Image (cartoon, rainbow, N blue to C red):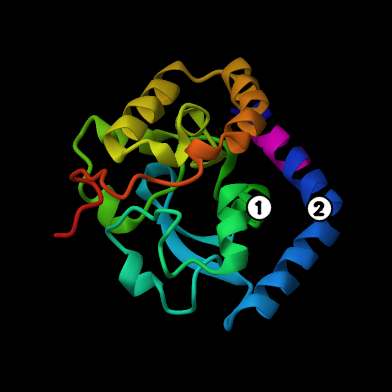
Amino acid sequence: MVIKRLLDVFLSGIAVVLLAIPLLFIAVAIRLDSKGPALFRQERIGKDAQPFMIWKFRTMKQGAEAETTHIYIGADNPNITRIGYWLRRWALDELPQLLNVFKGDMSLVGPRPTLRYQVERYDERQKLRLQVKPGLTGWAQVNGRNKLNWSQRMEYDIWYVQHWSLRMDAKIMLLTPMAVLRRDFAYADDAAQDDIVRPV
């Protein structure tokens, strides 16, 4: 785990420096495309159920969060901005989380961080995914990404926690570009629902 953390700091630091100009262009494009800030900040739950603030590029209209909680976001969701559609399609909206990785809230590889209300619905087995830091990419992401419902994601995440190794992390990072290129992985199926995300 010490080696994993050192790799997180080293690789995320290099990525932030190399991507600084593209990230700036994306931020400007977001501001020109719709009202609101370029970055979106939201509480997520990390390792050992500890909360932290995650950073993302804003992909929806300002104030859309109240309308999109408890639902899967499909490609035709009216709250998604023009720039936001492409950022989501290529997972570019997640790039600011490199700062979360560098800070130590997240790792490059691990289960994706979820919202507090979702974590409160975990059963004892599902809580296993909280034993490691959340990741920028993960085993669930390379095996279906947003195409998976939460029950499926949970199984992949739990499997990752139980079988973690540096070799596994390397494999996931190598598979991530191919998963991003898969168009059918980019957006969720609006019809898919389960107990983790459905309304109370």
Residue of label 2: 19
Q: Quadrant of residue 155 in the image?
A: top left
Quadrant that contains the C terminus: bottom left
Is 175 left, or right, of 23 in this rendering? left
Quadrant that contains the N terminus: top right
Q: Amino acid at mark 2?
A: Leu
Determine whether 64 is above or below 193 in the image.
below
Label 2: element kind: loop
Residue 95's label in the rendered image is 1
Residues at marks 2 and 1 touching, judged by CB atoms closer than 8 Å: yes
Structural crowding at the residue carrying mark 2, measured as other residues with C-alpha within 10 Å and reported as few (<14), some (14–19) or many (≥20)? few
* Place of residue 143 in the rendered image (x, y in percent of width and height, measured from the top left): 47, 26
* Place of residue 167 in the rendered image (x, y in percent of width and height, measured from the top left): 62, 16
* Place of residue 163 in the rendered image (x, y in percent of width and height, measured from the top left): 45, 16
Determine whether 36 is above or below 155 in the image.
below
* In the foreground, 191 or 166: 191
Q: Magenta residues?
A: 5-10
Q: Amino acid at mark 1?
A: Leu
Determine whether 146 is above or below 35 in the image.
above
* Place of residue 18 in the rendered image (x, y in percent of width and height, measured from the top left): 85, 49
Label 1: element kind: loop
**Viewer can see residue 105:** yes
- Dominant SS of magenta comes to helix
